[in-house]
Image (cartoon, rainbow, N blue to C red):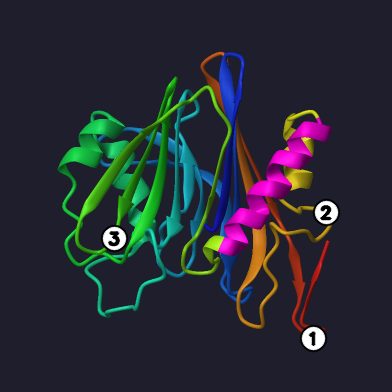
Amino acid sequence: MCTVSYIPKGSGYILTSNRDESPLRVTYSPEEKELKNGTKIIAPIDSEKGGTWIATDGANKTACIMNGGFIKHKRQLPYRKSRGHIIYEAFSSETFGTFADNTDLCNIEPFTLVLVDENKLSVLIWDGKEKHIQSLDSSKKHLWSSSTLYTREDHAKKMNYFQEFLRLNESDPENLLKLHGLYNDNLFVLDQPHVKTVSTTQVVVSNGESDLCYREKVYDHEKKELLY
């Protein structure tokens, strides 16, 4: 939910997401979920709230949500519903654009939602009071960090690392997993006492088809460390 990269690739794109969460929180491996309107998506599911932070429809559409808007906010509990259900609502709408324009976010905790539909890339940022919809250039590389866990200085360092890594390495799926610190810790990996990078999820879209790869980091509760 906390570090997301987007890389355009010919007839598609690669979207990779690191989830920073309590290592004690259980997540179910990706599964197909049919929404109320009949749309089918593939997503890992959070066991506690039943939501997700990333999903694809098996074709061109992908959605990924991060905690926080532009700046770190002070929580004002209770909220009306979990942000993990926002992605379901996005896929239940006729289009992502329709969802962004019409969704009611009153009393929802701030978030940043990346929405990709074929060659359209947009970001919906909810700051707790207003919606901000950004249309981005889908032919360019992008990187986002959650404002609840990373400062602007943290993000700037990650951006520099991101750009240098892509300058020196081919931006294929495996290298992007390395960039996100799947095998070795780097600036993309969070390691705090109660919040850590617990998994990396990657959606690869090519020629109108998508594939979702979900990789967990194994946490040793006795040693209180991540095992790779």
Question: Mark 2 highlights which residue?
Answer: 183
Question: Mark 1 highlights which residue?
Answer: 222
Q: Position of residue 40 (x, y in %)?
A: 40, 34
Q: Position of residue 184 (x, y in %)?
A: 84, 57
Q: Say which residue appears at 61% left-offset and 15% top-offset.
A: 10
**Residues under numbered marks 3 and 1 in contact, where contact means CB atoms less than 8 Å apart:** no
The answer to whether 101 appears left or right of 152 in the picture is left
Assign a secondary structure to mark 3: loop
Q: Earlier in the sequence, mark 3 or mark 2?
A: 3
Q: Earlier in the sequence, mark 3 or mark 1?
A: 3
Label 3 CA crowd tier, 10 Å (few <14, some 14–19, many 20+): many
Q: Main secondary structure of the magenta part?
A: helix
CA gap between label 3 and label 1 equals 38 Å
Bounds of the magenta segment = 153-169
As rendered, which of 67 and 74 lies closer to the eye? 74
Question: Mark 3 highlights which residue?
Answer: 127
Q: Relative to 153, does residue 11 appear above or below in the rendering?
A: above
Q: Nearer the viewer, mark 3 or mark 2?
A: 3
Q: Earlier in the sequence, mark 2 or mark 1?
A: 2
Is 175 within the magenta?
no
Assign a secondary structure to mark 2: loop
Q: Position of residue 203 (x, y in %)?
A: 59, 36
CA gap between label 3 and label 2 equals 34 Å
Q: Based on the displayed image, in which of its 4 quarters is residue 173 positioned?
A: top right
Q: Position of residue 169 (x, y in %)?
A: 82, 33
Tag 1: residue type?
Answer: Glu
Q: Relative to 102, does residue 82 appear above or below in the rendering?
A: below
